[in-house]
């Protein structure tokens, strides 16, 4: 029997409808053919492994001296709530390394005890994480 006429005997028969079982809804029928995720979370794990992080670099002595000078200038003008831009390192919660972030804001105070820059919006940045400070005004 050739492939062209293989199903001629059944191709025009009426569709069978069971008399004893209810007909399956289109939604339930479609669900039978949806993809099956045998390894739940595998795609997330692969994506997390591929995500890159930065390493925190150690500042040179010149860079540390420049930061100290910027902090002194800010402390001298603390009553004016100077606007600054700070670049600092944030550790990644899931893997080694992290990322450098830059924020801009008005300084409320420099907390010597906690070693943090405190902004007027109550945000805090630890001085140990700071890599660069720019005084905007």
Image (cartoon, rainbow, N blue to C red):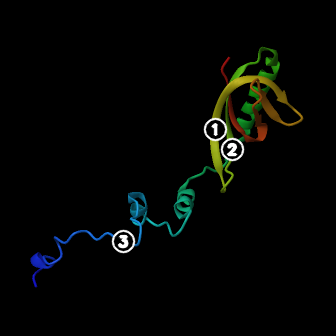
Q: Residue at x 73, y 19 (%)?
A: 82
Q: Which residue is mark 3?
A: 19
What whole-number distance in Å separates the C-alpha atoms at marks 3 and 2? 66 Å
User: Which percent across, then down, holds residue 93?
Assistant: 69, 52
- Whichever of labels 3 and 1 marks the residue nearer the N terminus, that label is 3
Whether 6 is drawn above or below 50: the answer is below
What whole-number distance in Å separates the C-alpha atoms at marks 2 and 1? 7 Å
Query: Which element carries disc 1, helix, strand or loop?
Result: strand
Left or right side of 1 for 57: right
Quadrant position of the C terminus in the picture:
top right
User: Which percent across, then down, holds residue 69?
Assistant: 76, 27
User: Which percent across, then down, holds residue 121?
Assistant: 74, 26
Nearer to us of marks 3 and 1 is 3
- Whichever of labels 2 and 1 marks the residue nearer the N terminus, that label is 2
Q: Which residue is mark 2?
A: 90
Q: Residue at x 10, y 77 (%)?
A: 5
């Amino acid at each position: 029997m050739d492939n062209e006429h293989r199903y001629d005997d059944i191709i025009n028969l009426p569709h069978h409808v069971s008399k004893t079982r209810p007909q399956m809804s289109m939604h339930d029928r479609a669900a039978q053919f949806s993809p099956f995720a045998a390894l739940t979370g595998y795609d997330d794990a692969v994506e997390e492994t591929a995500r890159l992080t930065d390493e925190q670099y150690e500042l040179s002595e010149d860079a540390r001296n420049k930061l100290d000078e910027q902090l002194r200038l800010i402390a001298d003008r603390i009553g004016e709530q100077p606007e600054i831009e700070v670049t600092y390192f944030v550790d990644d919660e899931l893997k080694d390394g992290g990322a450098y972030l830059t924020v801009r804001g008005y300084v409320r105070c420099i907390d010597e005890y906690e070693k943090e820059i405190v902004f007027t919006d109550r945000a805090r940045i630890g001085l140990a994480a700071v890599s660069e400070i720019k005084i905007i005004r």
